[in-house]
Every structure is written in structure tokens, then in C-alpha cells.
Image (tube, helix red, strand yellow):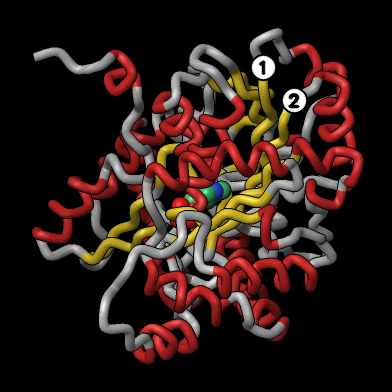
Amino acid sequence: MKFSKRIEAMQSSPVRKLVPYAQAAKAEGKKVYHLNIGQPDVKTPAVFFDAVRKFDAQVLEYALSQGIPELIDAIVDYYKANGLNYDSGEILITNGGSEALMFAMLAVCDPGDQILVPEPFYTNYNGFGSTVDVSLTPVTTTAENGFHLPSKEEVLAAITPRTKAILLSNPGNPTGVVYTKEEVRMLADIAIEKDLFIISDEVYREFVYDGEVHTSFASMEDAADRVILIESISKRFSACGARIGSLACKNKPLIAQIMKLCQGRLCVPTIEQVGAVELYKMPKSYYDEVCAEYKGRRDIVYKALQEMPGVLCEKPKGALYVVAKLPVEDAEEFIIWMLKEFDYNGETVMLSPAEGFYATSGLGKNEARIAYVLNAEELEKAMNCLKEGLKAYTALKK
Ligand SMILES: Cc1ncc(COP(=O)(O)O)c(C=O)c1O
């Protein structure tokens, strides 16, 4: 039996593909610190579970395809609190930010079209792209330049007649970059000049450190009808398993088109939406606390990496990740070795190989993404374990 070229061309998630090695390590009795996946250990706010417990309908009905009105209204208010202006007819609830991203691609691209994306980028963009026969055209950014964008000319040079959109996460996964207002403006100008959509993935909006300011593409009013805003409760409220995201756009005809996709998949789980309503009502102090917690974790990871011989990285300014160059030839081989062959007092660490976060082949081979999603004590242990692992591995390779 033959499978489709489309499915065969799709890459396995670099974040998840090494999981069997982690499972084998655990079966051997090793403790594995998971710094490979953005699964935070921060508690989901109790209001979510309280709302779910109070849910007392006799029938668990389909919800409306666009999402329950209470959740849409709560997001309208959340946007307002962030200085962004969307009305309830401009927002669709989706099965995670993932579905919102895929719907956006489907709605603005035909098979064979291209989307411009700064690399390294959130690796699942690759998977979503291959699902809908859209290729990603990378604009390479580097640690040396803080993963900021190259000049306008360089970005323009990567645009072809088949480019339909610019896609980026801001703050950035995996780089931790927070794009400046000038960069956001520059991309908005390019989108207007070249008649492109901007798929702006702002799921880490609140995770910004060191006084950096996040500029939303939604604040660029002259580009409003081409900005598709992607949100998720996964990291914002540490509710990854709820699978609630959303898509917002001021271009109502586009929303009407995407609504057809929403109708086709019927609805998003009803009970999780009920819980999510309460999350979007959390006070500002909630975000401040969570942000302070992650900043502390970022500091631990960055300091530890600075002290490891041969490791190079840029201090991330946002999100929950850092990309580090390791003193190894092949980061994936090292990560597998850490799981298969190494332990430090019965413990080891799992990272994500960064190669799959690039579209340009050959880039990222000696890099790994580290997600600082564990509490301070566990992170200290994990980073110490990584230091010992690197020491042992580099000695072995000499
Ligand atoms: C940048 C970015 N966008 C989208 C997603 C997907 O979020 P969700 O869990 O809501 O599908 C993630 C998840 O890690 C992410 O990092």
C-alpha cells in the first residue's frame, strides 16, 4: 500500500521523536529531566477546574463552531486590557493554537504557495506547512545578532510570487527573541507593499523579561485586515491539555472563510471552553507572578550555560526557551547518548535537537533547544547533569 507523498514528506516532531529513548531510560530506572518539551510544571489556575466541576448540563452538546460566546467575550476583554481592539465577530475558538495556525495557512495559501518565516522557528510550522502543501521560505537569524531580523532588503529578497504570508512567533519559540517595534513595523510595511498576510503567533505575549516591550502586530492599524492573530491557553495559563486556542482577524471576509473550516470540524470541546472563560478573567497580577517565575528559571539556565565550556547562547528575552550551540558535532547524537549511555547519580536530561527548527539544511546541527519549564530546584539539577554529560561526552570524542 502506498501512502501520500504529503505524509511521507512530513517530518516527525524533533521535540517528540526521541521520546522512545526517554521511555527506555526511565524503564532502566533513570530519572529524566524533560527540557525538550514546553510542558510547564506551573499549576493551572484553580478557577479552571472549579468551572469544570460546576458544569452541570445533562447533555454534553456540541458547542457553536466559532466557540462559546462567553469565551469569545472573555478574549475580547483580554485584548482590550492589552490595548487591542477586536469584536466578538472577529474571533474564532480553535483546538489549540495549532489548529488556528493550520486554518490560517489553509485559508491564505493554495498548494505550492510559500510562507516566509524567520528561522529558527517553532518546528511544528514545518509539519503544518507540509500538511497543507505549503513550503516555508526561511529568513535566517542568528544568535550573534540576538535572533533579530535582517535588513528589509534581505527580507524582501526572500519573497517570491508564490509567497502569501509572513509567519512568526513573537516572543519567539525557540529563540526567545522579542521583536522590536521597528521590526514589527518593518514586516507590516513589507506585508502591505507585497500584499501578504501576517500570521502572528503571539502565544507567549506575556512572557517578556528585562523590561523588553512586546509589540503586537495587531497594533499596526494600517495592516489590520492582513494580520491573523494566533493565541493559546497552553502556556499562558499552563493548560496545554485543554487544547484551547483562538484566531482573530479584523478581515471579516477571511473570518467567514475560516468559519467553514470550523464548521467542518464541528466544534472545540465544550467543557474546556467553559474552564478557559475563567482563565481569561485572571487579573494582571497572575501574569506578573508567572513572568517573574519564568524569569528566575531563565536566569538559572542562562547562567549555567555560560559556565559550560564551549557552549554558546544568546540571553533569551522572552518565551520559555533558549537555543544553545553545544561543543559537539551532532546535537541529536549527543541527546540520544545522554538518554542511552549516560546518567549522573541515576539522572539524565533530555533536550530537543535544534536542526528541525530550521528550514535551511545543515543549520542547527550542533544546537539544542532547552525549555526552562521546570522549577528552580529541578532546573539546577538538570543543568548540572547536562554539564556533567557534556564533559563526559566531549572527553569520549577526543
Ligand atoms: C510558538 C507556538 N505556537 C503554537 C503552539 C501550539 O500551541 P497549542 O498547544 O495551543 O496548540 C506552541 C506550543 O508550544 C508554540 O510554542
Residue located beneath label 1 in the image: 163
Q: Secondary structure at mark 1?
A: strand
Amino acid at pointer 1: Thr
Q: Nearer the viewer, residue 143 or 250?
A: 250
- Could you tell me how far apart the alpha carbons at marks 2 and 1 are, in whole angstroms? 7 Å
Residue 113 picture location, percent across and down: 57, 15
Report the side of 213 relative to 239 (left or right): right
Q: Which residue is mark 2?
A: 196
Q: From where the camera sits, is residue 340 visible? A: no
Q: Quadrant of residue 197?
A: top right
Q: How far across and how far down the image is residue 324, in percent?
A: 55, 44
N-terminal-most mark, 2 or 1: 1
Using residue 147 as the reference point, say whether residue 115 is left or right of it.
left
Q: Quadrant of the N terminus?
A: top left
Q: Are marks 2 and 1 in contact (CB under 8 Å)?
A: yes
The residue at the far top in this view is: 161
Above or below: residue 387 compared with residue 31: above
Residue depicted at 52% across the width and 30% down the height: 106
Looking at this view, is 320 or 158 the one in front?
158
Q: Secondary structure at mark 2?
A: loop
Quadrant including the C terminus: top left
Residue type, mark 2 in image: Leu
Q: Is residue 57 above or below residue 343?
A: below
Where 95 sits versus 191, above or below? below
- Give the image location of residue 230, x and y in percent: 61, 50
Residue at screen point 74% across, 41% down:
251
